Amino acid sequence: MRSYQEMNYAPIALFCYKRPWHLQRTLETLQQNEGAAESMLYIFADGAKPDASETDQTNIAAVRRLIRQNWRFKEIIVEEKAENQGLANSIVAGVTQVVNCHGQVIVLEDDIVTSPYFLRYMNNALQCYAHTLEVAAVTAYIYDIPNLPETFFLNDPGCWGWATWQRAWQLFNPDGKYLMQELKRRQLISRFNYDNTYPYYNMLADQVNGKNDSWAIRWYASLFLAEKLTLYPGKTLVENIGNDESGTHAGSEDFYRVQLAAHPIEVQPQPPVPNQAARAAIVQYLAAQNYMPPLWKKYIGRIKKMLSLNANTGK
């Protein structure tokens, strides 16, 4: 593998909408990365919705002023949409555009703060596994779980600071209904849900039913069904600062909080197989969050509700 100084830097695609404060932190930390000055940055700015409030319009205008500032990258290409495309359409179209032009892409949204070593890790991984067909993506986020390997593989591409190649992006299937049917037909729902510790299948169902506009759940399902791998770091290189209920799909989740890696993550070639020990540690971590409580707890809740109703009606 070539040294970092000789790296052919992958272009970065950054997607933003109406959060100027978050975007400023994203740009500030990104430009502090090793390799930022050698990297091309595409910025895709979504437009206002037809019913956008005055506050939204003000924030969108602030975002567009911000992205026109003199950030320290090799080249900045800005695309400002006149109308709202929505997060999923924006990311799918933008990623497709960049990978078709450059063959690879590093992807960020406007609420991702990066470690100074983020670009180093992403570019090294993209180069290391460019021709390993079993590997379809690289991700930079991982929960704060102790004793994970320096890097490892999972069947989950992640969505907070990630990268891929044109050959792998072609596997993306936007048809959520088909993906649901395949997971069910192949009896993979439990595994897709990390042994029923996180409701990913429900998220996919919500996308199909129009309750969310998630590209990420379909990207995960596409690669999961294709049995493709993603390289993970043992220590996170990104933090999502958007879980403050400021975004279209943002929530408030303390368990996503992390400490950024204080040192570079070294990327060395390894066999392209899932790391079952790392997966088990993640399953244990998710189970502790109680996102999907055991069925007996659900039944107890229903019984308590029925008893309460009976008491109130005198039955």
Image: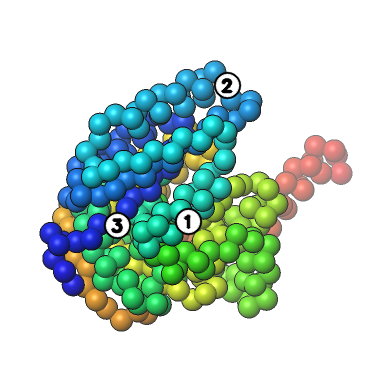
Number of numbered callouts drawn: 3
Q: Earlier in the sequence, mark 2 or mark 1?
A: 2
Say whether residue 299 is visible: yes
Q: Is residue 112 above or below residue 63?
A: below
Identify which residue is drawn at 22% across, 38% down. Answer: 72
Q: Quadrant of residue 184?
A: bottom right
- The residue that disc 3 covers is 10
| Residue closest to the eye, 290 or 16 | 16
Rounded to the nearest angstrom, the CA distance separating label 3 from label 1 is 14 Å
Q: Quadrant of residue 61?
A: top left
Identify which residue is drawn at 59% across, 47% down. Answer: 213
Rounded to the nearest angstrom, the CA distance separating label 2 from label 1 is 31 Å
Amino acid bearing label 2: Ser
Q: Residues within 10 Å of mark 2 (few under 14, many from 20)?
A: few
- The residue that disc 1 covers is 96
**Residue at the extreme front:** 101
Q: Is residue 223 left or right of residue 12?
A: right
Rounded to the nearest angstrom, the CA distance separating label 2 from label 3 is 37 Å
Mark seen at residue 67: none
Q: x, y (%) of residue 71? A: 25, 35
